[in-house]
Image: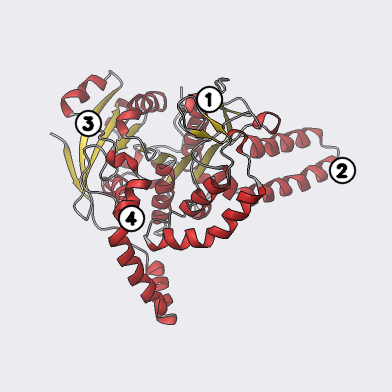
Amino acid sequence: MAKYYKAPKPTYSNWEWFKFIAARTVFPPILLWDLLKMGANKWLGGYVGRIVLPAQTLGFTGVSESDLGRYNTSNYTCEKYDVETHDGVHLDTVQITHRSQKDRDPKFQQYIINFVGNGACYKDIMDEMQRDANELKVNVIGFDLRGVGSSTGHAQSKDDLVTDGIAQVQRLLDAGVSPENITLKAHSLGAGVASLVAHHFLQQDIRINVFSSRSFSSITNFVVGVIRRDYNEESPRGSLLARGNKEPIGKQILGWMLKPIIKLAVSLVNWEISAGDAFKEIPEEFRDYMVVRSKKDIRADRLDDQVIPHYASVHEALSSERKDKKAAIDKLIKAAEKSHDVEKVSRLKAERNRIKESHKMDTISTDRYAEGHNSPWNGLKNRLGTNGHEFFKAFFQRADKDHGVHETQQSIKYL
């Protein structure tokens, strides 16, 4: 029988409540906007939710308890959890517990919580979850958002999805797990939700790790990015492709003109997911990401990410941050060159190149129709030669060494 957990209603900091109340006190028309949002969401929220999260209508099924045993090995066991949110939704959840974690004090146990894309369920990534548990020697969780697979309810707004993610994290916190030992491994829509979940806890001074894979900065930017794209080719299956990620000037102007209207509509139905803003506020040592972006000299013939336009990517949202970092390193390089410190110059140039190139992935497959958004993690490789799976592992290990909570001051040695 599945283990049961009832999540409390998410709490918010005094500062968040103060901002909420103060804004409506100083500018009462915001209350009218609140009422309009409430009405629009009640009328259209469920419909938009099925567009944003089509997995609700794809007939997925989770892994049954009777089938779960076949995933067990000598290194880990799999268990079912029924995680109930504060609003009565039951989330189908699976936990893989590594034997090295089983007898540890909960505060020292390490967890990865997976957030999948909008057309997937946790059953699709069981192999990936097992690999992470086996290689990193940690506990790994997979779950389906409300309305997907065996999870009950339906997604009426982005807040529902965030509530689901908060419940998964809160279960671990209530069990005594240190937040620094929790990593949200997230893809596409799941990464957008995970960024908001991590930001929610950050507002309460609780820091958890988040890795964003091939995600968007906001729903508004996603829609605008689709408008800006030049869909210039038909695939063998008949779908339109945007080869070369070209953006004709006319479409760029159209996107710019429509953006305020799109922003208004998306916000009105309460489906704006401002993942980029949330992600940027998370301390750098607690976050990392990857994007599919081929080199300029071959980009004209590549598909890259056919789901998330580059305009809407988290990578693009962080462009000013990267620019500032590279400018700061350039100053250090000039100073080191003046002092003829060759070794330091070499180190700084390597770091600058890492900032510039490490997050940009390309498909390993050279097939003309290879597309990066839904490629497996180890089917991508960055410009420094590291595949997506190893890139995530490096982040996990770096975060663990930097701020993980262990029995001793020595970080765990990964074999």
- How far across and down, in percent of the image, does residue 369 sit? 53, 25
Q: Is 71 displayed left or right of 26 in the figure? A: left
Say which of marks 4 and 1 sits in front: 1
Scheme of colours in the image: secondary structure
Whole-Å distance between the Cαs marked 2 and 4? 56 Å
Q: On residue 338, which mark appears?
A: 2
Q: Is 214 displayed left or right of 39 in the figure? A: right
Q: Amino acid at mark 4?
A: Ser
Whole-Å distance between the Cαs marked 3 and 4? 30 Å
Place residue 63 in its image quadrant: top left
Whole-Å distance between the Cαs marked 2 and 3? 60 Å
Mark 4 Cα-neighbour bin, 10 Å: few <14, some 14–19, many ≥20: many
Q: On residue 79, which mark appears?
A: 3
Question: Image height check: is 379 above or below 177?
Answer: above
Say which of marks 3 and 1 sits in front: 1
Q: Is 187 displayed left or right of 301 in the figure? A: left
Q: On residue 370, which mark appears?
A: 1
The numbered mark, 2 or 4, whose residue comes first in the sequence reads 4
Q: Is 51 displayed left or right of 393 in the figure? A: left
Query: Observer-nearest residue: 373 or 173?
Result: 373
- Mark 2: which secondary structure? helix
Query: Observer-nearest residue: 401 or 172?
Result: 172
Mark 3 Cα-neighbour bin, 10 Å: few <14, some 14–19, many ≥20: some
Do residues under tags 3 and 4 come within 8 Å of each other at their CB atoms?
Answer: no
Picture quarter with the N terminus: top left
Say which of marks 2 and 3 sits in front: 3
Kindly identify which residue carries mark 4.
Answer: 157
Residue furthest to the left: 1
